[in-house]
Amino acid sequence: MKLIMIGESSVGKTCCMNRFVSDQFSEVTKSTVGVGMVSKEIEVNGIKVKLQIWDTAGQERFATLSSNYFRNAMGGVIMFDVSNRQSFENISNWIDACNKIEEKRVLVLAGNKVDLSERVITKEEGEARAKEFGLKYFEVSAKTGAGINEMFETLTKEIVTLPKVEAQNNNEEVSINLASVDKETSKKGKGGCC
Ligand code: GTP
């Protein structure tokens, strides 16, 4: 199952991914160049799911993000930094970029760096913005690990419990094709879809 990380540069996409996959955090990171990918197997609803999490440089312009990056992604984390208003204001641009690719995927919104005392985006603001786009909202910190597992697990669970996916799960081999999931069905889920 392919998941993608989306958001401005330095919001902490790589760190959140690393916290989830290797339970590690680094204060000093290099800006991602190109596209990176890590994988992790988790179990949700009794099903083993191998997640492939793709990460790209937030420096990429919305318009120039390669369609390959989005292709076959079943879920995505749209991330902003709660101490950086600009990253929050740009959420809609990232969602628009995602919508340009004609596929259906479950998205969640994540406010990262909640460990910082100098946050400028409140939890209420984050929740309101998520509601506006019909997405689930998570407050996370790659530094402390708060909320990270819950976010990836909930996202994965939402995807595997989409009706068509469940039907396929019954056939043992979990080969999930969200292109065949009815758009209305996936929109009803709190996670939203584009
Ligand atoms: P690009 O690769 O440029 O798109 O950046 P990114 O979004 O992947 O950000 P990255 O994970 O490289 O983190 C950027 C900086 O934020 C680094 O200095 C991290 O240590 C810091 N950082 C990431 N997550 C957290 C967090 O939860 N709390 C705090 N305090 N700092 C964080």
Image: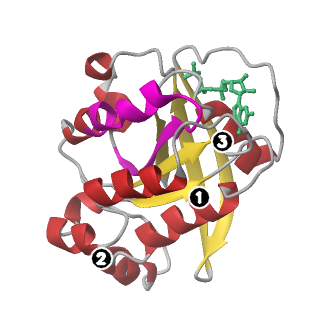
Residue 64: in magenta span:
no
- Tell me which segment is drawn in magenta: 72-95
- Identify the residue under disc 1: 152
How many angstroms separate mark 3 from mark 1 (CA)?
9 Å
- Crowding at dot 3, Cα within 10 Å, few <14 / some 14-19 / many 20+, comes out as many
Residue 178 in the image, given as x and y percentages of width and height: 29, 61
Q: Is residue 16 above or below residue 36?
A: below
State yes or no: Cβ of the residue under disc 3 lies below 8 Å from any atom of ligand 1: yes
Q: Nearer the viewer, residue 62 or 177?
A: 62
Which numbered disc flags the more N-terminal residue, 2 or 1? 1
Residue 164 in the image, given as x and y percentages of width and height: 30, 76
Q: Which mark is residue 17?
A: 3
Q: Is residue 154 above or below residue 28?
A: below
Q: Is residue 150 above or below residue 120?
A: below
Residue 94: in magenta span:
yes
Of badges 3 and 2, the one in the foreground is 3
Q: Is residue 95 above or below residue 131?
A: above
Q: Which mark is residue 164?
A: 2
Q: Do callouts 3 and 1 mark residues in contact (Cβ within 8 Å)?
A: no
Q: Which quarter of the figure has residue 175?
A: bottom left
Q: Nearer the viewer, residue 188 or 157?
A: 188
